[in-house]
Image (spheres, grey):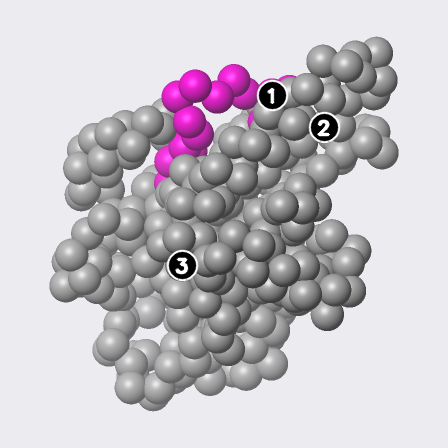
Amino acid sequence: MNILHMKYAVEVAKAGSINKASEMLFVAQPNLSRAIKDLEADLGITIFDRSAKGMVLTIEGREFLTYAQQILRQIDNVEHIYKQGKAQKQKFSLSAPRSGYISQAFSHFSKHIDTTNAEVFYNETNSWRAINNILMSDYSLGVVRYDKEYDKYYKIKLEEKGLNVEDIAEFHYRLVVHKDSPLAAKETVKISELSSYIEIVHADSSIPSLPVTVEKKSEAVSENERRIFVFERASKLDLLSENKQTFVWVSPVPEKILKSYGLVEKKCDDSKTLYKDVLIYKKDYKLSKLDKLFIEELHKTKPTH
């Protein structure tokens, strides 16, 4: 079995697609696909289910990934032992909700990466995948968002999974629209006034470990008949900046981002749910210097009610 191919498989699992993994690894897509197929043939298993949505781990693939990560960590440890004295690579990895304040904190944090020998991953995703990335994909930090009403429930579940949980922020969702939208002129907006507009929502929004009916009740703020589903935060912002008929529910957005896209943030008296963001990481994980610097920036940019 080729160790390099094992590393490729781990990166593909992290990225969720051959295309993204090839960019991170600087390996041509056909070569990366061939390497994964060779690895599967050597092992006699199917590691990934391939679909239009990307590369998804099979049950056998998840089991393989656990062993692969352990092996690769052992290899890193051996290299560290015998290469002491050489410059060590700084590593940082974060999975978090698509959120303006977290993105701003990450941008400020990036200025602290003061060496060329660094490897940094920032994965904007839903809460379930943020947890899974720490447990299965060796990410260091995660941010999980949920309805504060279920705070005790989530903290028990997260601790059962061997994760530390630290409170970051609490907030009500805000309405964001184009600055020239008729909604922008209103002091506050009623949910009933949104029926003629197009709502932009993240297609893979998910609250971890809750029944679907409870999850949807918790997440739903409005029930518009016209919706655009997106996966990338940048796509959402581009749509808002171009289409005055669109709106989105989000955590409070930094003023700098609003101005750069020509957007405004409005309060909605009908939005009663109080959301909570918490930081998670494995209990046996020791926070690095970069981790601590990011957490410091996160607390500086976090929103209030």
Q: What's the distance in space between the residues labelled 3 and 1, CA to CA? A: 32 Å
Residue that badge 1 annotates: 288
The total number of labels drawn is 3
Q: Is residue 279 visible?
A: yes
What residue do we see at 24% from left, 42% from top?
148
Q: Is residue 165 visible?
A: no
* Nearer to the camera, 258 or 40: 40
Q: Is residue 5 above or below residue 237?
A: above
Q: Secondary structure at mark 3?
A: loop
Q: Which residues are magenta?
A: 277-291
Image location (x, y in percent) of residue 24: 71, 53
Image location (x, y in percent) of residue 22: 71, 60
* Nearer to the camera, 55 or 236: 55
What residue do we see at 27% from left, 28% from top?
159
Q: Secondary structure at mark 2?
A: strand
Residue that badge 2 annotates: 90
Image location (x, y in percent) of residue 28: 78, 64
> What mark, if any, has residue 58 been given in the picture?
3
Q: Label 1 is placed on what type of residue?
A: Ser
- Of badges 2 and 3, the one in the foreground is 3
What residue do we see at 40% from left, 59% from top?
58
* Nearer to the camera, 168 or 173: 168
Q: Secondary structure at mark 1?
A: loop
Q: What's the distance in space between the residues labelled 2 and 3, CA to CA? A: 31 Å
Q: Label 2 is placed on what type of residue?
A: Gln
Image location (x, y in percent) of residue 196: 34, 88
Q: Please tell me which of labels 1 and 2 falls first in the chain.
A: 2
Tell me the crowding category of disc 3: few under 14, some 14 to 19, or many 20 or more residues within 10 angstroms, Cα based. Answer: some
